Image (cartoon, helix red, strand yellow):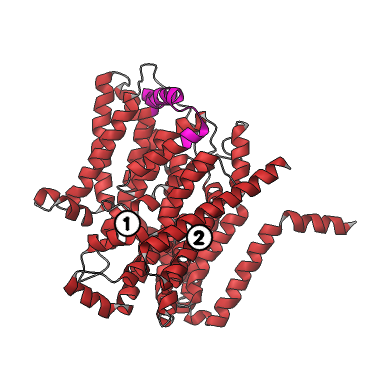
Amino acid sequence: MNKPKIGQFLKSNLKNIIFILLILAFTVCCAINAPITGAVGTLWALLPPVVAIGLALMTKEVYSSLFVGILTGGVIYAAASQSGFEGMFTAIVQEGFISNLADSYNVGILIFLVVLGIIVVLMNKAGGSRAYGEWASTHIKSRAGACLSTFLLGVLIFVDDYFNCLTVGSVMRPVTDKFKVSRSKLAYLIDSTAAPICIIAPISSWAAAVSGTVDSVNGIQLFISTIPYNLYALLTLLMVVFIALTGLDYGSMKLHEMNAEKGDLFTTRSTAYDKDDTPAHSKGKVIDLVLPVVILIVLCVVGMVYTGGLFDGTNFIDAFAGCDAAYGLSLGSMGALIVIILYYLCRRVLTFGECMDSIAAGFKQMVPAILILTFAWTLKSMTNMLEAGTFVSGIVESATAIRILLPLLLFVVAIGLAFATGTSWGTFGILIPIVTSVFSAEIADAAGTGTIPAMVIICISACLAGAVCGDHCSPISDTTIMASTGAQCDHVNHVSTQLPYALTVAAVSAAGYLLAGFVQNVFAVLGFSIVLMLAVLLVLRYVQNRKTVK
């Protein structure tokens, strides 16, 4: 009598059991690698994010999973430093939560997040979102059109990934909802046109971050040289267009899309975000959404270049390269908020009282994202305190003798590091200096000739591509969290549905970087990767069609 129950239990909890066994196996590997008292700079440093990510995928509870990961990091740090409970709580509370919430960059992002939430509520109350949805329904005729429109808007907003995620989500939610595109698919479209676009846009906050990582060469020139070899970003964009045009869905995304066609846009509970059910003003027009978005974009760009010294005589490109993205975005968004409120008051679509009520409502909408970001930042602090970057850089440096396989190795290591730590900037900040040290002689020669060796460009591109890929997959990534927020999608749903798509592109990119180590020709590498990507997508479509027929 008990055997069927045991079998049923094992079958229904197979994924959870696998995750638990993987976490236990990883813990055993950590113990073999080094005693916990010597955990700093060893494999132990990666255990906290592994625990957090595993629990999130297993329990579907992101807050508790992140907290357990933070607690794990605190325990390991206390054991390594032999500081007991006091050391654990100091690491978690003082060095973790308090330090991150006191960090000026993080506070700037939170201000930008809240202000954007307020602007979205204002647009909804003014009737701009409703009017835009009605206009779009007469011009966009299908789900494919809704997906492509989301993609195109994401491509146009290339200045910053945070800005991209939240703006595209706010504008396109009414349209994708109307055509029954699941919130998980919307989050995927947003996420796939955020970091992948910014990492190949010469005028973006990402270009500024990359251009400052290599000394003695022109940073912007180096960044532009890496674009054709940034296989993950380019192939992700190709995949998004293919999926939008063909309707290909696989993995758990297929279930979400099937449910959306029946009217359920969320599939699982969606209590994290309030529905967009604020009564819209009857006077609202399309201009009441379009103009505020334009004002927001313009003032945010102005804010960013202002922090880079544009008004002090610096040219536009250098101003972008030297900008403080968080300060610039918060400055621009607050200026935009004031202008937008004045605009709505002059248009008489909102009263002063309704505008003030929107401030609290906008803050409330962003509370889930603020909580997840705070936990994610604290978890990153735990991995930094345990010196995860030192451990990973040591692995890469020990394997640099095999230069032909170095692009593939860097790509894979960057994925793992960005996935575990949730930061792409931190990942290429760790790995690119390793590349420059390996190729120091070639880079020194390049400083004189002005020509950067192809292998240096390929290896740096592999670091950037792997960092974006790992960031794309990671539940604790800022950009992934922002994409969930922009789509107002359950965060774990977004991660679990996006992961198969991201891994598909990662596998093709890995093949491309393997070839790049042997054939250092951009046309051969990029051409091979595009053809292979299309072939994989066509095979997946054929398999899915066969399943549908059956």
SS class, disc 1: helix
Q: Is residue 64 above or below residue 365?
A: below
Q: Earlier in the sequence, mark 1 or mark 2?
A: 1
Occupied quadrant, residue 454: bottom left
Residue 141 belongs to magenta span: yes
Q: Position of residue 65 (x, y in %)?
A: 55, 57
Q: Marks 1 and 2, Cα distance to the nearest angstrom? A: 41 Å
From the image, state whether disc 1 or disc 2 is nearer to you: 2
Amino acid type at image mark 2: Val
Q: Residue at x 49, y 70 (%)?
A: 46
Dot 2 crowding, Cα within 10 Å, few <14, some 14–19, many 20+: many
Q: Position of residue 255 (x, y in %)?
A: 63, 42
Q: Position of residue 167 (x, y in %)?
A: 37, 39
Q: Residue at x 87, y 58 (%)?
A: 2
Q: Which residue bears the numbered disc 2? A: 508
Q: Which residue bears the numbered disc 1? A: 102
